Image (cartoon, grey):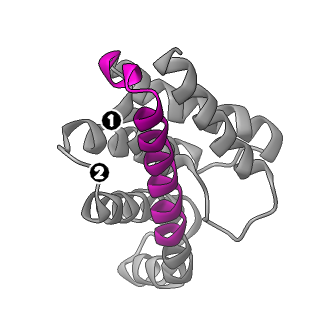
Amino acid sequence: MNRNLIIITMVLMAVATRLLPHPPNIAPITGIALFASHRFGDKRLAFIIPILCMFISDLFLGFHSTLPFVYLAFICISFLGIYSKNIHNGTILTSSTLFFVVTNFGVWLLGYPNTMAGLISCYTLAIPFFVNTILGDLFFTHTLNYSFNKIEMKYPDLALEA
């Protein structure tokens, strides 16, 4: 078995869920970014895979003006994953918060009055989406890592390929 092929297959299955109906902000990309950053030996893939997944799914879902902030957030999350010794709930919550701060800054910058009141309004109105972001990030990150750990237990040679 090829370790990278299994990882890529798992990532593709996760990204497919982005194309299915789902609650707002419950999406697999943070989980993919953290999973890829810890599982690929070639850390460049930790950056390429989440952005590529976003881009391909955005071809179907559509593009919007805040996408540069979304992509930047996932690049930062990949860095966080690479420099974290373990992916645990603290890492996931930090990633969710990073996504919330970066993307909503973009929303404020491009869609709200650039005043303190506009900034406060933007972040306040985004709180319900933040709850969904956390739930989705916890679910997808743990599901990907748990599943891959089970596969490694069944096929111990995969761990040697890392």
* Identity of the residue drawn at 33% across and 22% down: 43
* Location of residue 41 in the rendering, given as x and y in whole percent from the top left corner: 33, 19
Q: Residues within 10 Å of mark 1 (few under 14, many from 20)?
A: many
Region rendered in magenta: 133-162
**Tag 1: amino acid:** His
Q: Residues within 10 Å of mark 2 (few under 14, many from 20)?
A: many
* Location of residue 78 in the rendering, given as x and y in whole percent from the top left corner: 35, 39
Q: Is residue 4 above or below residue 128?
A: above
Please check the rendered image and state whether residue 150 is part of the magenta-colored stretch, yes or no.
Answer: yes
Mark 2 lies on residue: 87
* Identity of the residue drawn at 33% across and 43% down: 76
* Location of residue 55 in the rendering, given as x and y in whole percent from the top left corner: 65, 33
**Disc ID at residue 5:** none
**Tag 2: amino acid:** Ile
The answer to which image quadrant residue 97 occupies is bottom left
Q: Is residue 48 above or below residue 85?
A: above
* Location of residue 95 in the rendering, given as x and y in whole percent from the top left corner: 35, 57
* Identity of the residue drawn at 48% across and 61% down: 137
Evaluate whether residue 144 shows in this view.
yes
Residue nearer the viewer, 5 or 17: 5
Mark 1 lies on residue: 38
Dominant secondary structure (helix, strand or loop) of the stretch shown in magenta: helix
Sequence-wise, the earlier of marks 1 and 2 is: 1
The answer to which image quadrant residue 6 occupies is top right
